[in-house]
Image: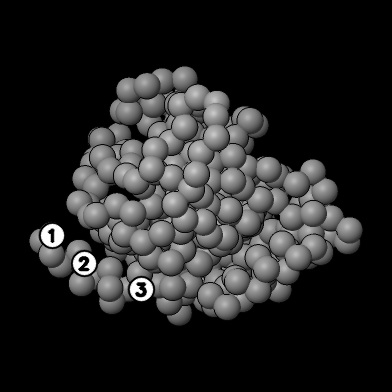
Amino acid sequence: MIRVACVGITVMDRIYYVEGLPTEGGKYVAKRYTEVGGGPAATAAVAAAKLGAQVDFIGRVGDDDTGNSLLAELDALGVNTRYTRRYHGAKSSQSAIMVDAKGERIIVNYPSPDLLHDAQWLSDIDFSQWDVVLADVRWHDGAKQAFTLARQAGVMTVLDGDVTPQDITELVALSDHAAFSEPGLARLTGKVDVEDALKQAKMLTNGHVYVTRGAEGCYWLQENTLHHQPGFSVQVIDTTGAGDVFHGALAFSLASGGPLHDAVRFASGVAALKCTRSGGRAGIPDCEQTRSFLSLFV
C-alpha cells in the first residue's frame, strides 16, 4: 500500500452557490449553501486516501467546534490525524467561497492567527515511514521542516505551489516535484509564458516542475522539453478543490511508479471527475472509477 503524508492547512469551507460571481458591491442571494472541510493539503490527503493510500494529515487546528468538525471529517474519510496539533483556546481557519453556475469560484480565506507557525515539533515524527510527502505553501515553516526531514530520510517530496505572500523559493529547492497553479508560478517567476516560467522555476530545483491551467490541462518539463496533458471534458459543477485533488492524485501516482506522463494523466482524470460534483471532496473518485473514465479517452 502506498503511504502518503500531507502537510499543511485544513480549513472549513463555507460555500455559497450563486448564479454569477459578484463584480461590484451589493446584496446577493445564494441558491444553495454547504459546509465542508477544505484546505490544500487536507483535501489532497482525502484524494490520496480515496485512491487507496494509507494517509496521514499533519497540520494545525484549534480546539473549537470547527476544529472538531475538520478532524472528524478527515477521520471519516480515511485520513489519519494522529500527527495534527490542536492549540488550546485557538480558533481554526475557515474560507468563504462563492461558486457560479459554470463552476468557477472566488475564495476568501481566513488563516487563523491563533495557530502558531512553529514547526520544530515535526522533528519528533519519523518521516521514513512514508513513500511520499506532499506539502502546501500555506504553512511555510511546516512545509520546509517536513521536506527537510523527508529528504534526509530519502522520501519523495511533492509541493503544491499555489499563491502565498511568502517567497517559496526554498520550498521549490527542496521539492522532487513542484506542481504550481498558474497564479503561483507567475508569482514565483514573474513570467506569463508557460514554458519560460517553468524553465525559470526549474533553475531552482533538481526536481520536476509542472503547472496546472484549469480546463486547459497541465504542462511540465521533462529533459528541458515542454510536455502537455490536455484537460478532460466533463460537465463542470464546482471547481473548488480541483487543484488540491490533482496534487493528492499526483503524489499517489508518482509514488506508485511509472512514467511522468501517466502520473499527470491519472491526476488530471481524478481532478476532472471531482469537478462533476459540488464541494471540494464529494466528487473524488477511486482508482477503479478513474481508470474507467480514462479508458474513454484512449
Q: Amino acid at mark 1?
A: Phe
Report the disc number at residue 297. Answer: 1
Quadrant in which the N terminus is drawn? bottom left
Q: CA distance from mark 3 to mark 1?
A: 18 Å
Q: Is residue 171 above or below residue 35?
A: above
Within-10-Å neighbours for mark 3: few <14, some 14–19, many 20+: some
From the viewer's perspective, is 114 left or right of 81?
Answer: right
> What secondary structure is marked by label 3?
loop
The reply, left or right, for residue 254 in relation to residue 92 is: left
Quarter of the image holding residue 182? top left
x and y, in percent, of residue 29 in the image: 50, 44
Q: Which residue is pictured at 79% across the width and 59% down the height?
A: 62
Query: Residue at 63% across / 30% down in the picture?
Result: 165
Of callouts 3 and 2, which one flags the residue occurring earlier in the amino acid sequence? 3
Q: Tell me residue 201's x, y (percent).
A: 45, 31
Q: Is residue 150 above or below residue 216?
A: below
- In the picture of the structure, the residue carrying the numbered disc 2 is 293
Q: Which residue is mark 3?
A: 286
- The residue located at (53%, 52%) in the rendering is 15
Viewer-side residue, 90 vs 213: 90
